[in-house]
């Protein structure tokens, strides 16, 4: 499973802040056995996030994970960018993540993170906090492989996955 990881942070993009969430996400997904093919940082800019996600979908990456930009500040535009790219939402993933974060903080209900599908790519928004990334990855991590396998069944030439 090939995975692309995007850190959405104006301060990290400007070289002011340190990216802690991106590496946390990379460690978590690597532990699942996924191969990280791309790691990038963009500022809190809707067009930049959309462009990056679209690029991953076009490249046929199975999993595109974002961290950051899912809250309520005017800068938080990751969910809007994600919604613009995905064809179908997978609300249960986002719901499970919000439910899990509520166990740690009531602020979890303010997360606007989105999960969905574009082409053969599953896109999931994570919060921009390394501890939250670890907590929430524990919840959704176990289903990501199955989600991607199911999603990929419609691809031609996958032999054993071919069902009509």
Image (cartoon, rainbow, N blue to C red):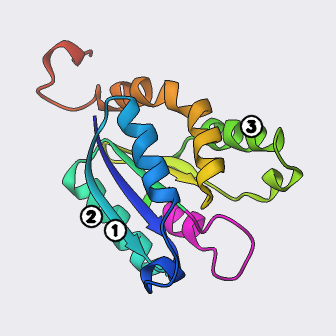
In three-dimensional space, the C-alpha distance between marks 2 and 3, rounded to whole angstroms, equals 30 Å
Question: Label 2: which residue?
Answer: 55
Identify the secondary structure beneath mark 2.
helix
Task: Check whether the beta carbons of the residues at disc 1 and disc 3 lie within 8 A of each other.
Answer: no
Q: Name the quarter where the N terminus is drawn.
A: top left
Q: Alpha carbon of mark 2 to alpha carbon of mark 1: how far?
A: 5 Å
- When the figure is inspected, residue 125 is found, relative to residue 80, above or below; the finding is above
* Residue 155 found in image quarter: top left
- Mark carried by residue 100: 3
Find residue 76 and report its image quarter.
bottom right
Q: Which residues are magenta?
A: 68-84
Residue 22 location (% of width, % of height): 45, 58
Q: Residue at x 73, y 78 (%)?
A: 73
- Helix, strand or loop at label 1? It is helix
Residues tagged 2 and 3 counted as in contact (Cβ below 8 A): no
Q: Earlier in the sequence, mark 2 or mark 3?
A: 2
Residue 88 visible in the current orientation: no
Residues at marks 2 and 1 touching, judged by CB atoms closer than 8 Å: yes
Residue 134 shown left or right of residue 106 in the figure? left
**Upstream in the sequence, badge 1 or badge 3?**
1
Residue named by callout 1? 52
Mark 2 vs mark 3: in front = 3
Q: Nearer the viewer, residue 161 or 45?
A: 45
| On screen, residue 65 above or below 40 | above
The picture places residue 27, in percent across and down from the top left corner, at 42, 43
């Amino acid at each position: 499973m090939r995975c692309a990881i995007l850190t959405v942070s104006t301060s990290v993009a400007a070289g002011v802040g340190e990216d802690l969430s991106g590496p946390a996400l990379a460690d978590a997904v690597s532990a699942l056995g996924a191969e990280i093919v791309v790691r990038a940082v963009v500022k809190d800019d809707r067009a930049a996030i959309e462009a990056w996600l679209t690029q991953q979908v076009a490249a046929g990456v199975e999993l595109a994970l974002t961290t950051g930009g899912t809250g309520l500040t005017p800068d938080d535009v990751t969910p809007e960018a994600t919604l613009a790219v995905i064809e179908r939402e997978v609300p249960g993933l986002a719901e499970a993540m919000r439910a899990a974060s509520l166990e740690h903080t009531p602020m979890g209900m303010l997360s606007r993170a989105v999960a969905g599908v574009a082409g053969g790519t599953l896109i999931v928004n994570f919060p921009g906090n390394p501890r939250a990334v670890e907590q929430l990855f524990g919840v959704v991590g176990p289903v990501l492989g199955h989600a991607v396998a199911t999603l990929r069944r419609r691809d031609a030439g996958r032999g054993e996955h071919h069902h009509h």
